Amino acid sequence: MFRWKRDGSGVFTGWIGPAACRVSQRGAHLQFEGASVRRIQRFFSLDVNLQAIASEIDVDPIIHAALKNHRGLRLIRQEPWECLGSFILSSFNNIVRLTGMLDRLALRFGEQNRFPRPEALAKVSERTLRRLGLGFRAPYLKAAAERVAAGKADLEGWRRLEDEALRRALLTIPGVGEKVVECVMLFAYGRTAAFPVDVWIGRAMRRWYFPRKKVTDRQIREFAREHFGPRCGWAQQVLYCAARTSFDRAEPSAPIS
DNA sequence: GTCCAGGCTTCAA
DNA sequence: TTGAAGCATGGA
């Protein structure tokens, strides 16, 4: 969730679909306002049995340590369009700059500072998007918005598709490749068999699972699917968190506390 | 100044 | 099918 903000007292503000929300955790209690219990539960995957998933993917000492260090971590279920647009812009980018890009887009073209609707972005010129700092991603986002706004990419209707069909459909959208498609499937459509391999997961997996071997991102993804099973997406989230918090990029170490 | 960032598209081979 | 180049921009 690139655009959620945390204030000094641990209160997070952000959006669940069109709803602006405030959320904070106090011990085992989640306090919130701005959305219904049902939507909060769905967005934060509070309706899943975390213990059952953790034990299902807890198949080796590495993921075991990562699970221990990130107990309570959950996947989100974001609105497909916002998730898709965000990850198209994440390409060859860093999170700080990406956040700035998303905030500028929302401020200028979104209602109530929300992520802009595809109909709004479809009308914006590539030149304008580039002036907001999107760089070479500007035409991708515009083209994707046009596809969605025109109904050629029916993101809501695609919820009915099986994993492989959904994957193929998403890959037809400009700016969506092997990594972004996995992110959208996992973070928006709840397809837990997805396993996005970005630079961080790539580093972590090569270090922890393939030392001194040359493997491609695809090989890593296929390994993870076999190794962790049909809910490997949960493992990806835990490993990503472990990678970004437990080693620096120069010399990653094992995620042992 | 150099390096790098939650990659994708295009074009060879 | 696979691999490499090119792509824009700002922070470290």
Image: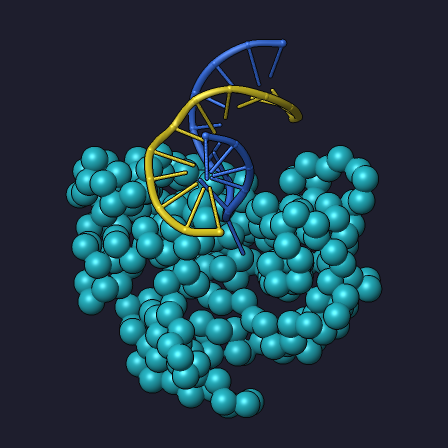
Chain colours: A cyan, B blue, C yellow
Q: Where is residue A55 in the image (x, y as percent from the top left)?
A: 75, 72
Residue A152 sits in quarter? top left
Residue at x 72%, y 74% (from the top left corner) = A68
Residue at x 55%, y 90% (from the top left corner) = A27
Left or right of residue A252, residue A182 in this image = left
Q: Quadrant of the N terminus of chain A?
A: bottom left
Q: Where is residue A154 in the image (x, y as percent from the top left)?
A: 35, 49
Left or right of residue A235, residue A100 in this image = left
Tell how many labels.
0
Q: Where is residue A195 in the image (x, y as percent from the top left)?
A: 61, 52
- The vertical placement of A5 against A32, above or below, is above
- Asked whether A27 or A8 is in front, the reply is A8
- The vertical placement of A193 against A48, above or below, is above
Residue at x 63%, y 50% (from the top left corner) = A249
Residue at x 64%, y 72% (from the top left corner) = A70
Q: In which quarter of the image is the C terminus of chain A?
A: bottom right
Residue A150: tell me if it is visible.
Answer: no
Left or right of residue A76, residue A63 in this image = right
Residue A126 sits in quarter? top left
